[in-house]
Image (cartoon, helix red, strand yellow):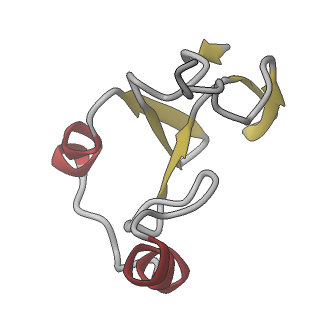
């Protein structure tokens, strides 16, 4: 079981390979284990058009990100459960 903070201030990146899971708060730690096989074109498109990849996308094919969730792995398959709302708090001043 892995958990993250509710707004992704400290990100959680994870990668599955050969029936195992590696995780880190910096994606470069996962890339040091083994270089990724390519660029996630959907995430790259989101980065160019919106300024950041959406959801659990990263620019790397085998790496995923998570915020505000608890990840559990059963039989090598991840299940993500959101424990807080996805919207940001209202930051307007009175």
Q: Residue at x 78, y 33 (%)?
A: 80
Q: Position of residue 84 (x, y in %)?
A: 78, 19
Identified at 41% across, 73% down, the residue is 47
Nearer-the-camera pick, 14 or 74 = 14
Identity of the residue drawn at 39% across and 68% down: 51
**Which of the 4 quarters of the picture holds residue 29?**
top left
- Is residue 71 depicted above or below 56 in this figure? above
- Left or right: residue 28 versus residue 43 is left
Compared to residue 65, the image places residue 11 above or below, namely above
Question: What quarter of the picture does the C terminus occupy?
Answer: top right
Instruction: Say which quadrant the N terminus sits in.
Output: top right
Q: Residue at x 52, y 34 (%)?
A: 21
**In this picture, residue 69 sits left or right of residue 59:** right
Q: Is residue 86 left or right of residue 8?
A: right
Q: How many marks?
A: 0
Horizontal and vertical percent position of residue 13: 44, 38
Q: Residue 68's spot in the image, x, y percent?
A: 65, 24
Q: Quadrant of residue 3?
A: top right
Quadrant in the picture for residue 88: top right
Q: Nearer the viewer, residue 48 or 75?
A: 48
């Amino acid at each position: 079981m892995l958990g993250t903070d509710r707004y992704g201030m400290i990100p959680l990146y994870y990668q599955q390979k050969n029936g195992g899971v590696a995780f880190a708060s910096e994606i470069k730690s996962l890339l040091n284990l083994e270089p990724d096989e390519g660029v996630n074109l959907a995430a790259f498109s989101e980065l160019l058009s919106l300024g950041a990849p959406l959801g659990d996308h990263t620019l790397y094919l085998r790496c995923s990100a998570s915020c505000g969730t608890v990840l559990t792995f059963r039989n090598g398959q991840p299940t993500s459960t959101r424990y807080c709302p996805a919207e940001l708090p209202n930051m307007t001043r009175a």
